[in-house]
Image: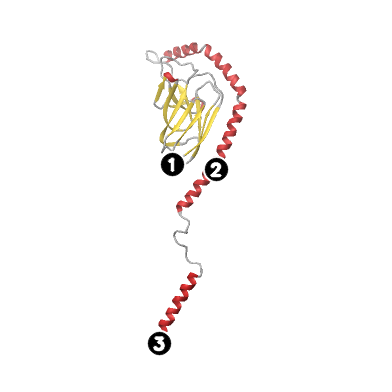
Amino acid sequence: MGRIQWIRVLTLAIGLSLTACADGGIPTEPSQATRPSFSSAQSDSAHARHDALKRELESREHEFQAIREASKDSLKVARAEWKAWKEDWNEQYKTQKELWKRLHPGAKGGPDVQLLRCEPKPYEGDAVIVGPAGGTLHAGPHELLIPKGALDHEELIVMEAPTSSLVDVRFQPEGLQFQRPAQLTLSYKDCVVPSVFDLLVAYLGQGNQILELPPSRDDRPDDKVEADIGHFSRYAVAW
């Protein structure tokens, strides 16, 4: 056998040997299909976050029930205070208006925007996991409608209506921003409503300070006022 033929035979033998080894299961470089993909890692992270939010949701639901039980006595106190305030609210407003005129001689108008007072109702709370598809929350007669596309990820949204003579609701996570406005509807049934003013939704800061007055729609026949809000966390009815 010549040298060239011998080299060819040897080359063929080596090739057949390598093929046999590959068929026999010697580990090779994993294919692209078997490697963990970036989207798979994202999916695992999203599932983990969703599970964490579900656990937090269960905790919140137990917390709501405990607060309802604990606030029964404070509801009685708040209603007694409301009854006393209701009896002389006209006199209080008259005094405020006279003071405003003294401070603004010759000017037209009246006292600054004020928060509406209502008969206190029991504490209510709601929590919902809301994602890009949107969702709805209710706290007593009040509603928050989060539209599709307002969020680009899941959040546990918490809505609370405390026992108070104000018509106010509080939201968490505090400071959350929406990519599309959410619609907030506040009910003012059983409230002392000034007949000459449209009611407003007010964004509140510390000490009930009114920070913003988003454009509002007063629906007198249904005793409710609506506004589009772009962020959290505390809102009330004003006039």
- Going by the numbered disc 3, the residue's amino acid type is Arg
Mark 2 or mark 3: whose residue is earlier in sequence: 3
- x, y percent for residue 145: 44, 31
Q: What residue sits right under mark 3 in the picture?
A: 3
Q: What residue sits right under mark 2 in the picture?
A: 52
- x, y percent for residue 133: 43, 39
The residue positioned 47% from the left and 52% from the top of the image is 40
Mark 1 or mark 2: whose residue is earlier in sequence: 2
Mark 3 or mark 1: whose residue is earlier in sequence: 3
Mark 2 and mark 3: span between their CA atoms?
72 Å
Q: The residue tagged with tag 1: helix, strand or loop? A: loop
User: Considering depth in this image, is 190 or 105 the residue closer to the camera?
Assistant: 190
Q: What residue sits right under mark 1 in the picture?
A: 152
- Going by the numbered disc 1, the residue's amino acid type is Asp
- The quarter of the displayed image where residue 196 is located: top left
- x, y percent for residue 77: 60, 19
- x, y percent for residue 195: 42, 14
Number of the front mark, 3 or 1? 3
